[in-house]
Image: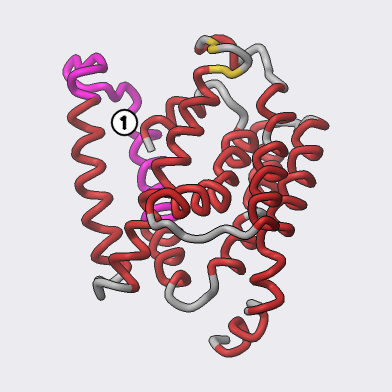
């Protein structure tokens, strides 16, 4: 999470969100190596197409991105968000195990993880940032934005995602998650005057094609639409 916020200083909101759309592919990749899950040739093809789809938007850069430094063709901000996405995916894998296999409620698992992670981030801030006497200079805007972020992200989104993991297939959740860069681009344009580039749309359609190839077998075997009706 800390890496994501650091990278967000230099990246547009829709590019940051789009990089997080690596999640379905990273999840399959980690599951293959960590849990020895089998992958068909079609899934490998979808994985390769999906990863390739991120190249256009990663290669396309703004002047703001280069301020944080570069490594080869990638900016440090992009790499920070990629690492954050990998860590987030692994966290969701552990959350899925806690909720589905170990019997913990989504609220308990989410609350404890946020408490421990937040404590570690605050400790890192104390040693890495300037506290004189605190790193906050504008308390009212900070409290307003923090409260809104906690309600929307931590209380609603994370708990809702953990709740939905128990009721909908991973296929449906993966395809639903691919809409987030589009909403991010819309809100970025509305609130921050961010204009999505052509590379954003090219990457989006390539990634969508890769995700469709990857999940096409599961869509035939276990369509998500009946599950939606069953729990409606």
At x 48%, y 78%, the residue is 167
Q: Position of residue 195 (x, y in %)?
A: 76, 31
**Secondary structure beneath disc 1?**
helix
Left or right: 38 in relation to 196: left
Q: Is residue 153 above or below residue 193?
A: below
Q: Is residue 141 above or below residue 163?
A: above
Q: Which residue is mark 1?
A: 139
226 on left or right of 132: right
- Magenta span: helix, strand or loop, mainly? helix
Q: Residue at x 39, y 57 (%)?
A: 35
For image coordinates 61% across by 15% down, the residue present is 64
The stretch drawn in magenta includes residue 138: yes
Task: Give the percent coordinates (x, y) of residue 107.
Answer: 29, 66
Magenta segment: 125-154
Vertical placement of residue 202 versus 25, above or below: above
> Would residue 148 be seen by someone viewing this image from the given angle?
no
Return the residue nearer the eye: 32 or 25. Answer: 32
Q: Mark 1: few, some, or many residues within 10 Å (few <14, many ≥20)?
A: few
Up the image or down, 163 lies above or below 66; here it is below
């Amino acid at each position: 999470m800390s890496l994501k916020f650091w990278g967000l200083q230099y990246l547009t909101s829709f590019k940051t969100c789009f990089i997080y759309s690596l999640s379905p592919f990273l999840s399959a990749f980690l599951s293959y190596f960590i849990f020895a899950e089998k992958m068909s040739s079609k899934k490998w093809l979808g994985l390769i197409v999906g990863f390739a789809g991120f190249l256009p938007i990663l290669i396309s850069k703004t002047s703001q991105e280069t301020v944080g430094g570069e490594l080869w063709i990638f900016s440090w901000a992009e790499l920070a968000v990629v690492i954050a996405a990998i860590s987030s995916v692994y966290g969701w894998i552990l959350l899925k195990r806690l909720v589905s296999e170990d019997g913990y409620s989504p609220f308990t698992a989410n609350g404890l993880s946020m408490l421990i992670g937040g404590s570690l981030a605050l400790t890192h801030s104390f040693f890495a940032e300037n506290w004189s006497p605190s790193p906050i200079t504008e308390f009212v805007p900070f409290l307003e934005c923090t409260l809104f972020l906690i309600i929307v992200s931590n209380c609603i989104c994370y708990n809702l995602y953990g709740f939905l993991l128990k009721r909908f297939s991973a296929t449906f959740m993966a395809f639903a998650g691919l809409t987030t860069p589009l909403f991010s681009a819309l809100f970025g344009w509305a609130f921050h005057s961010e204009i999505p580039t052509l590379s954003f749309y090219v990457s989006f359609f390539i990634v969508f094609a890769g995700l469709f190839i990857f999940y096409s077998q599961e869509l035939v075997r276990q369509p998500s639409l009946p599950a939606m009706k069953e729990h409606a």
